[in-house]
Amino acid sequence: MNNSSFLIITGHFFNPHSAVKWDNIPRGALCFNERGRIVAFGEKDDVLKEYPVGRYCELIDHSDSIIFPAFVDTHLHAPQFHCRGFYSDNLLEWLENFIFAEEEKFASSAYASNIATELFKELVSFGIGTASIYGSVHPNATDILFAKGAKTSMKLAIGKVMMDRSDYETTEESISQSLDLYEKWEGQNNGRLRYSFTPRFALSCTGKLMAEVGRIITGNKALCQTHLSENVGELEMVKKLYPDYENYTAVYGRNGILRKGTIVAHSIHLNDDEYRILSASGCGVAHCPDSNMFLHSGEMNLARMQKEGIPIGLGSDIGAGSTLSPFNSMKMMIYSHGRSDIVPETAFYYATLGGAKVIGFGELTGNFDVGKDADFIVARKPRRVPEGADNIRQILSHLIFCNGEHHVRAVYLKGERVH
Ligand SMILES: [Zn+2]
């Protein structure tokens, strides 16, 4: 051990590895260095043997708390921050009635700047350390979003929404503005900021634009995000607009959009061929159960996604989602699916490491593997947990179903306390 300084956090740890595998360590410890990198994790006695408390090694005791990785939100719309809870039972009407008008306000840099400040403050307060974010169509507003995000310790994928079927922009403008932002922000903050090309969805983009995005992301191994098969009415319109394609998923697949590093949100109404296309492509799915219930869009088939080995992460999808709270997203996920599909530990996996893998930050965050950033949440354990204080399922369940955000005591990102 050299003379760098280390911080050790002790407490009851939950550490996810997959949807079915996790560690439950009631007397655990996490040690990280001054750069916020994890150097040791496991049983408290083992960690303290390797890193004894002393002049260069400080200990903070949270033995009455549950500690788990910081959350990951795989899908949210920054310009819809103030559009939550506006009632509609239909995606396309909701977009026309509330969303497009609000997103136009982001032509104003001052407006965009104020919302970005509020957004990042709220994300961090919920313990969200990583997110994939849609901006508006305006390059300047997206640039502001990056600049504000760069000042946080978050890992972020952000993109300017591309919609060249509208009056907002031409295909050429959409591509060149996105490329400028990519050049400026891709890989900044030591790889913790990524640009994500963001063709909004097949109804707002031309085939020409999608083919060009497919070419760019394939050539550069760049990130990409879009929406797929959210609403039945949307499906009908896609069929009319793209008669030469066998299904909605093929519109993206044949244009090169679907690959590792691409996130498709929702993916609810799919046929067998479409599951096969997604599975073979390596892309991930942002599952947004709160939004899907709010807009009566339908339910993603979780069991089928798992069976096909398609990576999944949870997303709030604000403004169709009602809150950024990952506890709420997990609750809605459990409500949405059959009882054999998901238990609280599995929901926590999808809200942490599962999401990190989907966005492309799985090597940096999502659990307590040595070498990753020390991104974690310290939460008060529920006062009464049935049968033994180490019953991890009931501790996590209580957080999910009883507004866990009120239990959060501290949020650390890259080893630094940010909330
Ligand atoms: Zn969305």
Image (cartoon, rainbow, N blue to C red):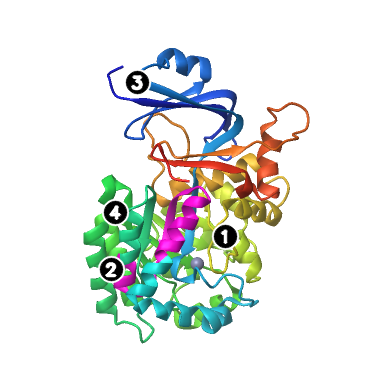
N-terminal label among 4 and 1? 4
Between label 4 and label 1, give the one nearer the viewer.
Answer: 1
Which amino acid lies under the numbered mark 4 shown in the image of this protein? Lys
N-terminal label among 4 and 2? 2
User: For the residue with label 3, is its CB less than 8 Å from the closest atom of ligand 1?
Assistant: no
**Residue most toward the bottom?**
167
Residue at label 1?
A: 288
The quarter of the image holding the N terminus is top left
Residue at label 4?
A: 221
Q: CA distance from mark 4 to mark 1?
A: 25 Å
Q: CA distance from mark 1 to mark 2?
A: 26 Å
The answer to whether one can see residue 325 in this image is: yes
Which dot marks residue 178? 2
Question: In this picture, which residue range is highlighted in magenta?
Answer: 116-143
Which amino acid lies under the numbered mark 3 shown in the image of this protein? Tyr
Q: Secondary structure at mark 3?
A: loop
Which amino acid lies under the numbered mark 2 shown in the image of this protein? Ser
Depth check, front residue: 235 or 51? 51
Q: CA distance from mark 3 to mark 2?
A: 46 Å
Residue at label 3?
A: 56
Residue 325 position, x and y percent, is 57, 55
Residue 91 position, x and y percent, is 57, 76
